[in-house]
Each structure stands twice: as structure tokens, then as C-alpha cells.
Image (tube, rainbow, N blue to C red):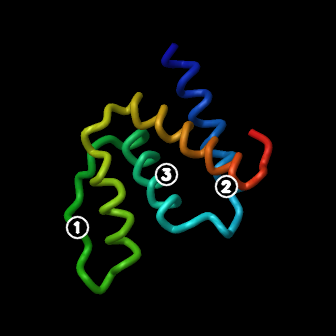
Amino acid sequence: MVALMVEEFELYAVKAKSLPDTTTNENLLIIYGLYKQATVGPIDTSRPGIFNQRDRAKWDAWKAVEGKSKEEAMNDYVTKVKQLLEEAGIAV
């Protein structure tokens, strides 16, 4: 079961790269946070400073999902990427 989940997660990690440029930053940050939680686990760095808005937003997105297990994060990531691909009219 876990091997299938990992396989599907890796497949959708590749498919996520085909998301259109119109994908909102909010959605990109959601999948970024889920990806990092699934692959690295809980965030282990301090929050970037106020002048580094891009990295700070990514840090916040990862921090927002820190309570999820790797399996939950993988599952949520796949679900979110599927949703974004379908909204963009890209075959899932």
C-alpha cells in the first residue's frame, strides 16, 4: 500500500511541473508545503526574515502542514495536484 502511494506521489510530483503559469501562488505554496512535509518531514529551519518574502512564504506554507504524517502529506499532495490539473483542463 505504501509503495503504491509513493509511486503515485512521485508520478504527480512530475505532473505538477506541467501546471500552467496561471496557477495561483497560493495553490503553488500549498503543494510546496505538502511536498516538503512528505519528502523531508517537519520543518527544521527558522523562519526567514521579513526582507526575504519568497522564502518566508514557502516556509509558512510548509509550517502550515507540519502536523501531517508523511503519508497524509503525500495523499493530500496527490489530491491537490489532481484538482489543479483538472481545473487547468490537463488530463490527469
Quadrant where the C terminus sits is: top right
Q: Which quadrant of the structure image shows residue 62?
A: bottom left
Which residue type does callout 2 highlight? Lys
Q: Residue at position x 41%, y 37% from top? A: 73
- Per the model, the C-alpha gap separating discs 1 and 2 is 26 Å
Of the image marks 3 and 1, the number of the one nearer the N terminus = 3
In depth, the one of 75 and 6 nearer the eye is 75
Would you say the residues marked 3 and 1 are in contact, meaning their CB atoms lie under 8 Å apart?
Answer: no
Looking at the picture, how far across and down is residue 87, in whole percent? Answer: 69, 52
Query: Residue 86, labelled with which disc?
Result: none
Q: Residue at position x 66%, y 46% from top? A: 14
Looking at the image, is 4 positioned above or below residue 70?
A: above
Mark 1 nearby-residue class (10 Å; few <14, some 14–19, many ≥20)? some
Q: Residue at position x 40%, y 52% from top? A: 33
Mark 3 nearby-residue class (10 Å; few <14, some 14–19, many ≥20)? many
Query: Residue 31, labelled with which disc?
Result: 3
Residue designated by label 2: 17
Residue designated by label 1: 47
Mark 2 nearby-residue class (10 Å; few <14, some 14–19, many ≥20)? few
Q: Residue at position x 62%, y 64% from top? A: 23
Looking at the image, is 15 positioned above or below residue 50?
A: above
Q: Secondary structure at mark 3?
A: helix
Of the image marks 3 and 2, the number of the one nearer the N terminus = 2
Q: Is residue 36 left or right of residue 83?
A: left
Looking at the picture, how far across and down is residue 47, in whole percent? Answer: 22, 67
Which residue type does callout 1 highlight? Arg
Q: Secondary structure at mark 1?
A: loop
Question: Which-is-in-front pick, marks 3 and 1?
Answer: 3
Spot the residue most to the left. Answer: 46
